[in-house]
Image (cartoon, grey):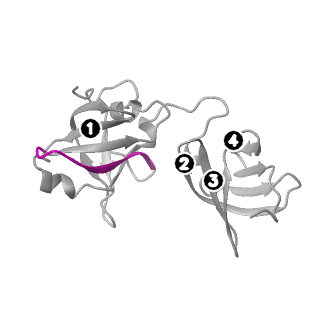
Amino acid sequence: MTPPSAESDHAEGGAVPGAADTPIVVGRIQAPHGVRGWLHFRSFTEEPDMALTLTPWLIDAGAREPKVVELEEWRTQGENFLIKIRGVDDRNAAALWTGKSIQVAASAMPPPGEDEYYWNDLEGMEARDGKGARLGRIVSVFDNGAHDVLVIKDDTRERLIPFVPVYVLDVDAENRVIRLDWDPDWD
C-alpha cells in the first residue's frame, strides 16, 4: 500500500514541527526484511495502522534535529508492518535504521478521547498513592503487550506500575499529578 499524502485526516498540513511542537514516538523500526530495503515496523498507536497515516515522519537523529523521512510503501505482516522508506533501497541501508524510533509532531496526533492519555503527557507527572504519599515521578511509559506500564522513579528506587483502571485512581493533567492505588512499600 502507498501511504496517504501529507494532507491526511490527522496531519495539519504536513509541516515540520517547530520547537514548541513536541515529537511523539508512534513506533519503532525493528529489523531489515529482505534485500530491497524493506523494514519491520512496530506501531505503538492504539489502532496500529494510524501510525502509518500520520505525517511527516521524523526519525531521531541523536543530538541533531530529527530527520524527516518519507514512507514510500507499507503492508501488514501479522500484528506489525513491513515498510519501505524512500531512499532506503537495500539491506545494508535498511540495517542502519534498526532500533530507530519514528516520531510525529504532537499537532499531527488526533486529540485523545476521554480518560485517554498520550505517553508523553504522562511523563514527568508526579505519582502519589491514594493517601497522597509521593511515589516518585513518571520517567517513561511502555507497552508490555498486555497493557501500558508506568516507570516511576524516586530518589532510591524504580517502580513499574501497570497503567490499568484497578491501580489508577485519578489523573490530574492540569496539576500534573496521578494518584495510584499502590502501597509505597510494595516492590
Mark 1 is surrounded, within 10 Å at the Cα level, by few (under 14), some (14 to 19) or many (20 or more) other residues, namely many
Q: CA distance from mark 1 to mark 4?
A: 30 Å
Which three-letter amino acid code belongs to the residue tagged 4? Val
* Residue beneath the point at 73% across and 38% down: 165
Mark 4 is surrounded, within 10 Å at the Cα level, by few (under 14), some (14 to 19) or many (20 or more) other residues, namely few
Which three-letter amino acid code belongs to the residue tagged 2? Asn
Disc nearer the start of the sequence (1/3): 1
SS at badge 4: loop
Q: Is residue 25 magenta?
A: yes
Q: CA distance from mark 4 to mark 3?
A: 10 Å
Question: Residue 160 vs residue 30: left or right?
Answer: right
Q: Which residues are magenta?
A: 21-36
Mark 3 is surrounded, within 10 Å at the Cα level, by few (under 14), some (14 to 19) or many (20 or more) other residues, namely many
Disc nearer the start of the sequence (2/4): 2
Find disc 1 in the rendering and name its residue. 82
Find disc 3 in the rendering and name its residue. 150
Task: Name the front one of labels 1 and 3.
Answer: 1
Residue 161 drawn at (x, y percent)? 68, 54
Disc nearer the start of the sequence (4/3): 3
Residue 53 drawn at (x, y percent)? 34, 30
Find disc 4 in the rendering and name its residue. 164
Which three-letter amino acid code belongs to the residue tagged 3? Leu
Find disc 2 in the rendering and name its residue. 144
* Residue beneath the point at 80% across and 54% down: 182
Q: Quadrant of the N terminus?
A: top left
Task: Name the front one of labels 2 and 4.
Answer: 2
Residue 13 drawn at (x, y percent)? 32, 31
